[in-house]
Image (cartoon, rainbow, N blue to C red):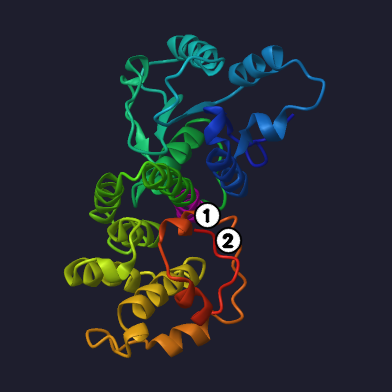
Amino acid sequence: MATSQNKKIKVFLCHFSEDKPIVQTLYKDLVLSGVDAWFDKENLLPGQEWEREIPKAVHSSDIILVCLSKKFNQRGYRQKEVRIALDEADMLPDGEIFIIPVRLEECEVPFRLRRWQWVDLFEENGSERLMQSLVLRAEGMGIKLGKQGKASSIGENIQRNIQKKEQKNIKEKCTNLLELKMYKDAYDECKRILMQNSFNAQANLFAAIALLEGRGADLLPDTRIKKAKSHLKRIRNSSYLYPLSLIVLGIIKYDCYFAHGEEDGEDSSLSFTEIKNKIIGTNIDFTEHSFLRYVTASKKALLALGIYDYSN
């Protein structure tokens, strides 16, 4: 029989399938914090009947974390998981922590879950608040929850996964708008994101591309070129996107200035030659970054930059 010293609090993770990567991060960090967490991808074995095993896991859990996102309210089996959890909650004493709605992003909390205070894991202190609830529930069961210092890593890891998801969404949405030549809409979408984080590398890159409107840089007014360059400057801290920003900046500098025997008087940070030297040796997969084709460049500019497989 398990004693209070080696017994662990059991936590069931209810989630939407598309949120699995983020929830898996939460699962791993909970386990490191001394929690006996149940997550279908980790705990459901091949050949087991999920319609039998999942209700069993819910019934045996001490806490249910309902991981909410914008897509969670779509119909699916997880709604049955929530119903089972609600039935369990009705049998518990008033005031006992059992169901915790966990928002992974800004989203609506389903009506049936609004009676319980939710926690926002995307907020700075979200992970600490979640851990406080788990500790409180564990103490009520005579269980000491170990490694509580892991709370901060839960939030950090969740933030990283949210950012990856956000970057993917930005890329997909802006690429579709550029494909439709809806340059203003693409730029407005980037501005909306940059209002929250002015150094979002993905949004700054697409903002610069949208400003070029699929035309040659030498055909655009100086004010637009200046604004595009200001967006590109904010990408310097992104090792992944910085080479791409250099390509766009190099095209602008060549077609607007270098090809005419001029230097960019407004920007002394990098000359065209310096940009070219930085690009040389950089291994860029242009099939992965096909959105670069929306940056119209002269053949001379591409040759001068040493780019031969760029797709327009």
For the residues labelled 1 and 2, the Cα–Cα distance comes to: 6 Å
Rendered location of residue 54, percent (x, y) = 65, 18
Q: Nearer the viewer, residue 155 or 2?
A: 155
In this image, 145 relative to 259: left or right?
A: right
The reply to whether residue 36 is in sight is yes
Magenta span: predominant SS is helix
Circle 1/circle 2 CB separation < 8 Å: yes
Per the image, label 1 sits on a secondary structure element best described as helix
Residue drawn at x 42%, y 31% as measured from the top left: 69
Type of amino acid under label 2: Phe
Residue drawn at x 33%, y 70% as measured from the top left: 234
Report the residue marked by disc 2.
Answer: 286
Q: Is residue 307 above or below residue 267?
A: above
The reply to whether residue 237 is in sight is no
Stretch of the chain drawn in magenta: 149-161
Q: Which corner quadrant holds the N terminus?
A: top right
Determine the image quadrant of residue 210.
bottom left
Q: Is residue 37 above or below residue 310?
A: above
Q: Nearer the viewer, residue 139 or 114?
A: 114
Report the residue marked by disc 1.
Answer: 290
> Which mark, residue 122?
none
In this image, 37 relative to 92: left or right?
A: right
Type of amino acid under label 1: Ser
Determine the image quadrant of residue 226.
bottom left
Neighbor class of circle 1 (other Cα within 10 Å; few <14, some 14-19, many 20+) is few
Q: Does 153 appear in magenta?
A: yes
Q: Is residue 238 above or below residue 4?
A: below
Per the image, label 2 sits on a secondary structure element best described as loop
